[in-house]
Image (spheres, coloured by chain):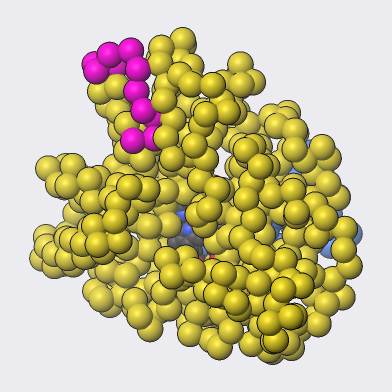
Chain colours: A yellow, B blue
């Protein structure tokens, strides 16, 4: 690719225009035939996919790979971009079938509808405690730090079997990983501490098993302890900021609606509407493949934009309208195909319990600054809020 | 009436079908899909078709 070609390409990534909607450019891309070629900051080019049908096609095509070890896999920036399973054994979101199958098979019994339902009392306790602490501190809070990040971190630690006495440590380290003001050095250190902690936990659980995910997977024997440590890190990282961003954005959106109908449709619509994981599902073609009439050559990177798909008017009427009465089923906020989010039913539970707790126990809850002053995460891989000042 | 079959070899245990059509699908202890009603009609048939449409692994077939 010459530099004149690169100059004609659209630069990636785009910003959301101060609203939860996907970048307005996606609308234009959607009307163009084929796919759109874009240039990453690195100068690498990728194909952008913005239509619902084609996002699903990309995410189910066996000629398209999730493995960053393949030539041409997109690397939007140094910090954005997945490790491969060669770098971190157990990082199965980066493996293609059939290598991916063994991990998914080992993990799904831990995330069945029934298993997730049984976690409800534990999630309720975590949410209640977080609200107790907020209320005890006065009549205002910074919801991202005090609630939205706390809840998923505690839920994951409880799932993994982190003893209660260690949960503060765990929460503190996981927050460092996702906080804007952390330096790269602080992040690397926190990540190292967490990995070391998880490895120690695995050693302890192999001697004294408990009623938790790590113990059961050790006993199941499908994964090695080393793989299990990568799996635990993946669950932690995949499930923390994603869930936190959804909780915070949902609070803003639901307060604007002035209503919280605690049903499943509201949750699905929130997931569709905000589509926080727009840039998460990166791919590369490992054979020539045609997508939506576009020839994508072997070795070319593909970015299926889930926010694009979830705001495709062909699939969802009036896509920019938040409408909790619409059946938003069929959204791809959790991806599609064999890698579709393993934690999705846990997310649904956490969101429901979080809103029930917040709006039920703090009926006067409101955002403490004008909406224009809210700091959105425009430039990260995940859309969300850096901070959410609230009062009651 | 429509006949429902599933390919458990493709299933990735996402439970989308269980949420969309709880009268038609369930998960076994390993997390894989299990058909509760392989000949649903009325409302159950409609939900089964929704499940077919959203199954991320395209593991559900509705035979008309
Ligand atoms: C609202 C919150 C969340 C969103 C929007 C989200 C989104 C996603 C998306 C889009 C993918 C697909 C990635 C791809 O195709 O490359 C994914 C995969 C995954 N997610 Fe989530 N996620 C959320 C929360 C969670 C939670 C709470 C957990 C775990 C406890 C989790 C664990 C995973 C795992 C393990 C994968 C990889 C699955 C596989 O490769 O088979 N996620 N998630
Ligand atoms: S929706 Fe599809 S992949 Fe998910 S459990 Fe049902 S059959 Fe399996």
Residue visible at 79% across and 75% down in the picture: A291
Q: How far across and how far down the image is residue B21, in percent? A: 68, 45
Q: Which residue is at 70% across, 70% downward?
A: A38
Asked if the stretch drawn in magenta spans residue A32, the answer is: no
In the picture, the quarter occupied by the N terminus of chain A is bottom right
> Which residue sits at x=32%, y=31%?
A146
| Frontmost residue, A45 versus A62 | A45
How many numbered tags mark residues here?
A: 0
Quarter of the rendering occupied by the C terminus of chain A: top left
Left of B40 or right of it: where is A374?
A: left
Residue A288 higher or lower than B3, as above or below: below
A250 to A302, vertically: above or below: above
Counting from the top left corner in percent of width and height, residue A204 is at 11, 62
Relative depth, front residue between A327 and A319: A319
Evaluate whether residue A344 shows in this view.
no
Q: Give the quarter of the image for residue A219.
A: bottom left
Horizontal side of A56 relative to A271 (left or right) equals right
Q: Residue at x 48, y 21 (%)?
A: A369
In the image, the segment drawn in magenta is A135-145
Q: Is residue A276 above or below residue A223?
A: above
């Amino acid at each position: 690719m010459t530099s004149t070609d690169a100059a004609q390409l659209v630069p990636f990534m785009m910003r959301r225009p101060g609203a939860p909607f996907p970048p307005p450019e996606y609308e234009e891309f959607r009307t163009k035939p084929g796919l759109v070629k874009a240039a990453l900051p690195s100068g690498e080019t990728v194909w952008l996919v913005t239509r619902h049908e084609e996002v699903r096609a990309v995410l189910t095509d066996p000629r398209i790979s999730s493995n960053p070890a393949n030539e041409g896999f997109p690397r939007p920036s140094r910090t954005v971009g997945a490790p491969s399973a060669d770098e971190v054994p157990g990082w199965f979101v980066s493996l293609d079938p059939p290598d991916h199958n063994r991990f998914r098979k080992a993990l799904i019994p831990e995330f069945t509808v029934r298993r997730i339902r049984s976690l409800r009392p534990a999630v309720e306790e975590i949410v209640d405690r977080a609200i107790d602490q907020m209320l005890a501190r006065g009549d205002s809070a910074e919801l991202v730090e005090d609630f939205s990040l706390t809840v998923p971190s505690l839920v994951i630690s409880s799932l993994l079997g982190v003893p209660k006495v260690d949960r503060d440590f765990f929460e503190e380290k996981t927050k460092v990983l996702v906080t804007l003001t952390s330096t790269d050095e602080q992040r690397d250190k926190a990540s190292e501490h967490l990995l070391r902690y998880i490895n120690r936990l695995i050693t302890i659980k192999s001697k004294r098993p408990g009623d938790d995910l790590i113990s059961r997977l050790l006993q199941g024997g499908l994964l090695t302890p080393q793989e299990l440590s990568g799996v635990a890190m993946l669950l932690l990282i995949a499930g923390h900021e994603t869930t936190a961003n959804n909780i915070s954005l949902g609070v803003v959106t639901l307060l604007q609606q002035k209503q919280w109908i605690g049903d499943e449709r509201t949750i699905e619509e929130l997931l569709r509407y905000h589509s926080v994981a727009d840039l998460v599902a990166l791919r590369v073609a490992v054979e020539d493949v045609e997508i939506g009439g576009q020839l994508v050559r072997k070795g070319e990177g593909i970015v299926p934009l889930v926010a694009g798909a979830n705001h495709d008017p062909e699939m969802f009427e009036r896509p920019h309208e938040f409408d909790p009465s619409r059946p938003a089923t069929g959204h791809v906020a959790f991806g599609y195909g064999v890698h579709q989010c393993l934690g999705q039913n846990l997310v649904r539970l956490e969101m429901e319990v979080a809103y029930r707790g917040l709006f039920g126990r703090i009926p006067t809850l409101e955002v403490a600054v004008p909406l224009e002053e809210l700091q959105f995460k425009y430039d990260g891989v995940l859309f969300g809020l850096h901070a959410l000042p609230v009062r009651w | 009436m429509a006949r429902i079959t599933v390919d458990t070899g493709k299933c990735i245990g996402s439970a989308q079908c269980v949420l969309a059509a709880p009268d038609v699908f369930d998960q076994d202890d390993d997390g894989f899909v299990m058909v509760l009603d392989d000949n649903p009609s009325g409302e159950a048939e409609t939900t089964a078709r929704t499940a077919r449409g959203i199954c991320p692994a395209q593991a559900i077939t509705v035979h008309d």
